[in-house]
Image (cartoon, grey):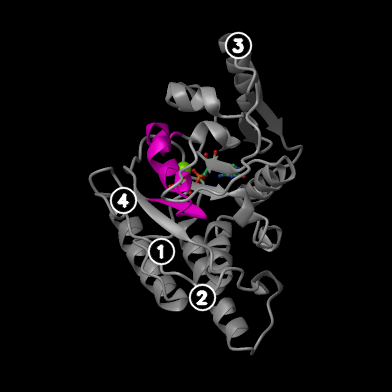
Amino acid sequence: MQPQPRRRPPTRDNPVPLEEMKIAIYIPAYNGASTIPMVLDRIPENIRRIAAEIFIVDNASPDNTYLVGLGYAAQKGMTNLKVYRNDSNRGYGGSQKFAYQYCCDNDFDLVIMLHGDAQYAPEKIPYLLEPFTTGEADMVFGSRMSGDPRAGGMPLHRYMGNIFLTRVENWVLGWNLSEYHSGYRVYSCDALKKIPFQKCSDAYHFDSEILVQFAMSGLRVVERTIPTYYGTEKCYVNIWKYGVDVLLTMSEFLLHKKGWRYSDKFNVSPVVGPTPVPALAK
Ligand SMILES: Nc1nc2c(ncn2[C@@H]2O[C@H](COP(=O)(O)OP(=O)(O)OP(=O)(O)O)[C@@H](O)[C@H]2O)c(=O)[nH]1
Ligand SMILES: [Mg+2]
């Protein structure tokens, strides 16, 4: 039986168990045929059971991502595992737009983004979900930088770049996150419905732009420490372009905020009062 959308808002005194929430696990995938089964295997049993839907979005991969996903669902008898395939590649941001719209349109409460290349630990899902049971987060951000990213193999230039971009982003947004660049995140669909995430980029800096929209809306971000893993997976990101895109996003936001240059994607009104500073990682 599929869980019903939750009716009462959770509070610290009156938490709502995960079983009463309609939870989606969204797995963005591009050429993920070799890693998807491992990612799925590692999702904790209780989470697999209570997730209303686990869905892979195959972004027009040239490999067998789609068939591997379908085969896994059939072999394990997982009726809650679905595989969607884009006819053409929509980019990493484009994949997220599809996924979050799908979750909002289908009354999910929470959507967990779990990368299909096995860089993020599925075992941490319960830990990332915790703040939602007490209504303390609109988004939970898995941070590698609040742990030991170098021990997990983060290359030095990425580590330094992450620190630099994070300083700029914290300065611009008035936040104190330990990083902005991990792709392990859980969003509340109520929060997603309040921001124009469809106007964000289709590229990698979608992840930064959506955080700016969260900041502008006054939505609450909670950090949780996650392990870092860099293995043999292929890296598709041009990190220099990514860095420039993030800096351009921050400049665009500053110009918009000062009223010097209007930017549609940052036309977001505060929904719950002044922007709260994110709760730092535990
Ligand atoms: N490269 C790429 N990845 C995509 C796309 N759509 C979905 N993905 C998935 O999105 C996730 C993140 O993409 P990655 O290219 O690994 O980017 P990243 O993890 O931010 O960067 P790295 O640290 O270099 O791995 C992976 O699981 C991809 O399979 C796409 O169009 N291009
Ligand atoms: Mg990756």
Q: Which residue is mark 4?
A: 155
Helix, strand or loop under label 4? loop
Residue neighbourhood size for the residue with mark 4, other residues' Cα within 10 Å, grouped as few (<14), some (14–19), many (≥20): few
Q: Residue at x 38, y 67 (%)?
A: 166
Above or below, 130 against 58 in this view is: below
- Residue range corresponding to the magenta coloring: 118-144
Q: Which residue is mark 3?
A: 77
Q: Residue at x 59, y 36 (%)?
A: 24
Q: Is residue 253 left or right of residue 156?
A: right
Q: Is residue 35 at all visible to an observer of this figure?
A: no
- Give the Cα separation between the discs numbered 4 and 3: 39 Å
Q: Which residue is mark 2?
A: 274
Residue 224 location, x and y as percent?
Answer: 36, 50
- Give the Cα separation between the discs numbered 2 and 4: 37 Å
Above or below, 242 against 265 in this view is: above
| Marks 3, 1: nearer the viewer | 1
Q: Which residue is mark 1?
A: 278
Magenta segment: does it hold 171?
Answer: no
- Give the Cα separation between the discs numbered 1 and 2: 12 Å
Above or below, 216 against 35 in this view is: below
For the residues labelled 4 and 1, say whether their Cβ atoms are less than 8 Å apart.
Answer: no
Q: Specify the amino acid type for callout 2.
A: Pro
* Residue situated in front as seen by the camera: 258 or 48: 48
Q: Is residue 43 left or right of residue 85?
A: left
| Marks 4, 1: nearer the viewer | 1
Residue neighbourhood size for the residue with mark 3, other residues' Cα within 10 Å, grouped as few (<14), some (14–19), many (≥20): few
